[in-house]
């Protein structure tokens, strides 16, 4: 934490102490220096700013080391606070992880964001699923660290003891339920949204794989890669006019 304070006019006194060179004067010098540091004014962050700073540090560390390789103390060290300082905002490591996942990864690129974008296929009377998935891929292309975080957690959560095990085990069903609440404009070949489920599942599986390829390098354009694959996921002529 940066400290700012008024500079006291102690230099002549310090020089005088040094000139006398005695142990007593050295003690006086130490006392004066300590006293001066206590008068520095600390810049304190608001609770909201500190909480977000902790979340940002946790995102970075977990995306680099994984959940199992990151401790609360690691996060505290990265922020410059004590372990208890982190636990004031997040009572446990599991609470911190849940906040990282729910407040960061799952809050960007939503269907609601797409509806507000004004992009083709985002209007209520012509609401297109392929257009939304393109939007989601574009959003993910702007946040590689969070995509890496998601990928790490997805693998780690195979362990039944992982705090997000159930979350990831049920993720596909949760996504399906979420998407099914919207009135998508679908080709006439599909009589209900339920019939789209295999297509959507394949699309999300392909998206996960392409994102891993994108993260690993060498560099590729995630959006271009998705554009190359989209015709295979939503083929002609069925999806013509509905992408």
Image (cartoon, rainbow, N blue to C red):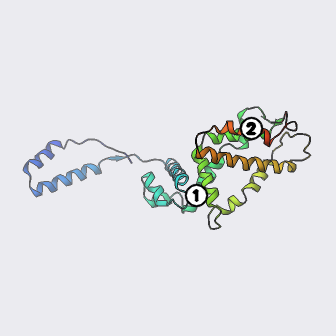
Residue 7: image quadrant is top left
Horizontal side of 146 relative to 194 (left or right) equals: left
Residue nearest the observer in this picture, 90 or 47: 90
Quadrant in which the C terminus appears? top right
Residue 27: image quadrant is bottom left
The 10 Å Cα crowd at callout 2, few under 14, some 14 to 19, many 20 or more, is: some
Residue 93: image quadrant is bottom right
Horizontal side of 85 relative to 41 (left or right) equals: right
Q: In this figure, which residue is indicated by the disc labeled 2?
A: 115
What is the secondary structure assignment of the residue under circle 2?
helix
Q: Residue furthest bottom?
A: 161
Return the x and y of residue 170 as percentages of the image width and height: 73, 59
Is 163 above or below relative to 234? below
What is the secondary structure assignment of the residue under circle 1?
helix
Is 175 above or below relative to 231? below
Return the x and y of residue 202 as percentages of the image width and height: 77, 49
Return the x and y of residue 44 as percentages of the image width and height: 42, 48
Disc with the residue nearer the chain's start (1 vs 2): 1
Q: In this figure, which residue is indicated by the disc labeled 1?
A: 97
Residue nearest the observer in this picture, 110 or 36: 110
The residue lying at 17 percent from left, 52 percent from top is 29
How far apart, in angstroms, are the residues tagged by discs 1 and 2?
A: 29 Å
Residue nearest the observer in this picture, 231 or 142: 231
Residue nearest the observer in this picture, 158 or 121: 158
């Amino acid at each position: 934490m940066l400290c700012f304070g008024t500079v006291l006019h102690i230099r002549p006194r310090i020089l005088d102490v040094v000139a006398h060179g005695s142990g007593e004067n050295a003690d006086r010098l130490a006392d004066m220096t300590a006293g001066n540091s206590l008068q520095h004014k600390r810049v304190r962050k608001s609770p909201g700013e500190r909480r977000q700073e902790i979340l940002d540090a946790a995102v970075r560390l977990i995306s680099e080391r994984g959940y199992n390789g990151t401790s609360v103390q690691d996060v505290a060290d990265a922020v410059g606070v004590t372990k208890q300082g982190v636990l004031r905002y997040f009572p446990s490591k599991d609470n911190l992880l849940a906040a990282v996942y729910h407040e960061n990864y799952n809050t960007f690129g939503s269907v609601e964001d797409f509806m507000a974008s004004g992009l083709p296929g985002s209007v209520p009377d012509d609401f297109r699923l392929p257009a939304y998935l393109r939007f989601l891929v574009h959003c993910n292309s702007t946040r590689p660290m969070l995509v890496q975080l998601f990928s790490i957690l997805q693998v780690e959560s195979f362990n039944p003891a992982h705090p997000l095990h159930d979350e990831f085990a049920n993720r596909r069903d949760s996504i399906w339920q979420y998407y099914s609440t919207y009135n998508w404009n679908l080709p006439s070949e599909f009589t209900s949204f339920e019939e789209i489920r295999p297509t959507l599942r394949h699309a999300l599986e392909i998206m996960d794989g392409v994102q891993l390829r994108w993260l690993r390098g060498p560099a590729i354009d995630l959006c271009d890669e998705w554009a190359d694959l989209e015709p295979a996921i939503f083929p002609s002529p069925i999806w013509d006019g509905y992408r």
